[in-house]
Amino acid sequence: MQLLPIRLSPGADIRRALEEAVRSQSTDSAFVISGIGSLTKARLRYAGEPTESTIAGPLEILSLSGSLTSSGAHLHMAVSDAWGRVYGGHAGYGNVVRTTAEILLALLPDGELTREHDAVTGFNELVVRRGG
C-alpha cells in the first residue's frame, strides 16, 4: 500500500479531484485516510435521504474518509459552520475548496476495490479483490 498526501487548491471540487488523483497514479482503488480543510459550500446526502443538500459556507472540513473505486466513490464528510454547527453525510460533487484541503490517500496498486449490488442491503457495497 502506497500513501499519497495531496493538497487541493481553492476552487477544486474535492470528489472530482480525488478521483483524478487516483487515476493519475495508475490505479483506480484507494482509501481516503483523512482530510481537513475549508469549503465555500458543501454538498452532502444525509442518512436515508434520496437527494443531496447544500450547506452554505464558509465551512471547515472536520473529517473526510471513504473509498475510491472504478465503479464509484463512497465518501463521508463532516463539516462545521461559523457557529460550530456540524453537518455530516455522503460527500457528493460540488464540495468546493475555499482555501485548502489536505488529504491522505492509501493507494492499492496490487488489488482492486469495486462496488457491486448486495442482495442483503439493496445497495452497491464495497468488494475487495486481492492482488496476486
Image (cartoon, rainbow, N blue to C red):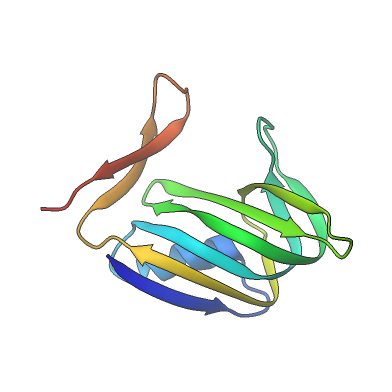
Q: Is residue 127 left or right of residue 14?
A: left
Q: Position of residue 95 (x, y in %)?
A: 67, 61
- Name the residue at the front extreme: 84
Q: How many marks?
A: 0
Give the residue displayed 35% in from the left and 71% down from the top.
3
Q: Is residue 65 left or right of residue 2?
A: right
Give the residue displayed 67% in from the left and 79% down from the top.
10
- Name the residue at the top extreme: 120
- Name the residue at the right extreme: 83
Give the residue displayed 44% in from the left and 52% down from the top.
67
Give the residue displayed 77% in from the left and 59% down from the top.
80
- Screen quadrant of the N terminus: bottom left
Q: Position of residue 115 (x, y in %)?
A: 38, 40
Tell me where residue 16 sits by quadrant.
bottom right
Q: Position of residue 48 (x, y in %)?
A: 66, 30
Q: Position of residue 21 (x, y in %)?
A: 43, 70
Instruction: Please tell me which residue lies in front, 21 or 66.
Output: 66
